[in-house]
Amino acid sequence: MFIVFDGPDGSGKSTLLKKVAIEMQLDPFFEKYAVFTTKEPGSTNIGKEIRKILLSVEETPAGLTEFLLFLADRAEHYQRFLKPALKDEKNIVISDRYWESSIVYQCLEQKIINFNDMLKMHKIVTNFLTPDLLFIIDSEIPHGLKNDRFDNLGQDFRENIRKKYHSILKMTNLKYPKIYIDTTEQNWDQYVKDIIRHIKEII
Ligand code: TYD
């Protein structure tokens, strides 16, 4: 089972993912499963080096370079972790960002690559692995941004990114369940319960 949390920066996605994973590990319903959390970019050793380049505020890569670096990180993540982990049906992998981030940031927002070419690249890099369930975590107001190159792009950029995530929800060619969670009110316990209910429904 492959579950993805994606969404704009500052939506509380990473915090929520950690809370969900902990609750799942405590819930007898998931007793026979092993729950793993992972992230993009930067979950592998090589990925961590790629992440440093991507988020550095000192140097901005050309658009295509940026896109290919995210793909290189994903290739490493897929080969070293996702592919072997997902072979075992008892494993539930929850990833903080995956290819939906590339669709939103590099394809729809920055228009570095068109969607059809993006699909072809996704096939090459991950043999078209798509999530069994996608949560789009969004918030009207950011809950705490860091000081990296993407977080520094400002409120207008963030609003554009939010709109693109809304358009992903309507993309009929992404044929997996997509669930929208609005974290503006910060009712974290409620969101955790809702998310776990959705996960139980597809198991
Ligand atoms: P992330 O690790 O979620 O940032 P943070 O630790 O600050 O919460 O992601 C870093 C940035 O990379 C984020 O702004 C989104 C961007 N990104 C892309 O532009 N394309 C991608 O394919 C991925 C995976 C991330």
Image (spheres, rainbow, N blue to C red):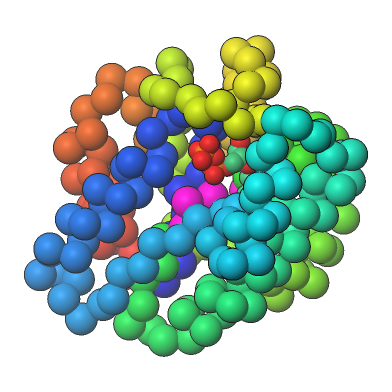
Confirm whether residue 173 shows in the render. Answer: no
Q: Residue at x 53, y 75 (%)?
A: 81
105 to 100, vertically: above or below: above
Where does the image place residue 149, in percent across and percent down from the top left? 67, 30
Q: Is residue 12 left or right of residue 29?
A: right
Q: Residue at x 66, y 66 (%)?
A: 46
Q: Which quarter is ligand 1 in? A: top right
What residue occupies the far front of the structure in this picture?
A: 58
- Judging depth in this view, the residue of 102 and 56 nearest the camera is 56
Q: Is residue 86 left or right of residue 83?
A: left
Where does the image place residue 112, in percent across and percent down from the top left? 87, 40
Part of the protein shown in magenta: 95-100
Location of the C terminus by quadrant is bottom left
85 to 160, vertically: above or below: below
Location of the N terminus by quadrant is bottom left
Residue 113 placement: quadrant: top right
Confirm whether residue 19 shows in the render. Answer: yes
Where does the image place residue 18, in percent across and percent down from the top left? 30, 50
Inspect the magenta stretch and tell me whether residue 146 lies in it: no
- Judging depth in this view, the residue of 73 and 198 nearest the camera is 73
Q: Residue at x 21, y 61 (%)?
A: 24
- Judging depth in this view, the residue of 76 and 49 nearest the camera is 49
Q: Is residue 46 left or right of residue 65?
A: left
Residue 158 placement: quadrant: top right
Where does the image place residue 200, in percent across and percent down from the top left? 25, 62
Count of numbered badges drawn on the protein? 0
Q: Is residue 49 left or right of residue 190?
A: right
Q: Residue at x 46, y 80 (%)?
A: 85
